[in-house]
Image (cartoon, helix red, strand yellow):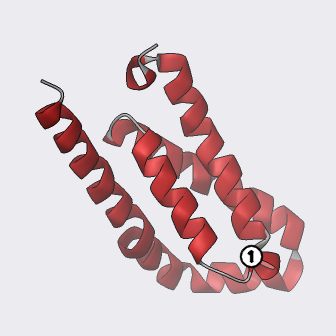
Amino acid sequence: MNFYNNRLVQILIVILYPITAFVVLSNGAKIVSWGIPAVIAVLFCFLWKNLRYLIISNALLWILSVPIWFWIEGGQGAEVFIANLPLIIPLFMFIVFLPEVIIVLIRNFLLNKFRR
């Protein structure tokens, strides 16, 4: 079975990323490290087939996680999050999303170059 060409496996990875990221980041106080979330993000970069799956997975992360987090936190925690969105979104774009894009592009370039 070719892992990257199996559509079902890729869809499962796209769905698994938001769930994993939400669970790991929701338990950040227990983890007390940014190393584990960073390693998980890098591992998912090696699992996505292309940028489309990366973008869908990150969109699902935001679409599903933010309302669930509001529901869990409620009250003042949600207000603090909303107030900090102008800072959170650019930080996410440059610290999480852009490196993921670069890793996926480099991985795809290397796979295509050395596959022959």
Location of residue 62 in the rendering, given as x and y in whole percent from the top left corner: 59, 56
Location of residue 65 in the rendering, given as x and y in whole percent from the top left corner: 69, 57
Q: Is residue 7 above or below residue 78?
A: above
The crowd level at tag 1 (other Cα within 10 Å; few <14, some 14-19, many 20+) is some
Q: Is residue 88 above or below residue 113?
A: below
Q: Is residue 46 above or below residue 103?
A: above
Residue at horizontal 62%, vertical 69%? 36
Residue at horizontal 53%, vertical 68%? 38
Residue 41 as seen in the image, left or right of residue 15: left
Quadrant of the image occupied by residue 14: top right
Residue 39 as seen in the image, left or right of residue 95: right
Location of residue 104 in the rendering, given as x and y in whole percent from the top left corner: 31, 48
Residue extending farthest to the top is 1
Location of residue 47 in the rendering, given as x and y in whole percent from the top left corner: 46, 40
Instruction: Give whichever of 25, 68 is nearer the camera.
Output: 25
Residue 23 as seen in the image, left or right of residue 45: right
Residue at horizontal 51%, vertical 49%? 59
Work out which quarter of the rendered image holds the C terminus and state it.
top left
**Amino acid tagged 1:** Gly
The tally of labels here is 1
Instruction: Give whichever of 68, 37 is nearer the camera.
Output: 37
Secondary structure beneath label 1: helix
Instruction: Write down the residue under mark 1.
Output: 28
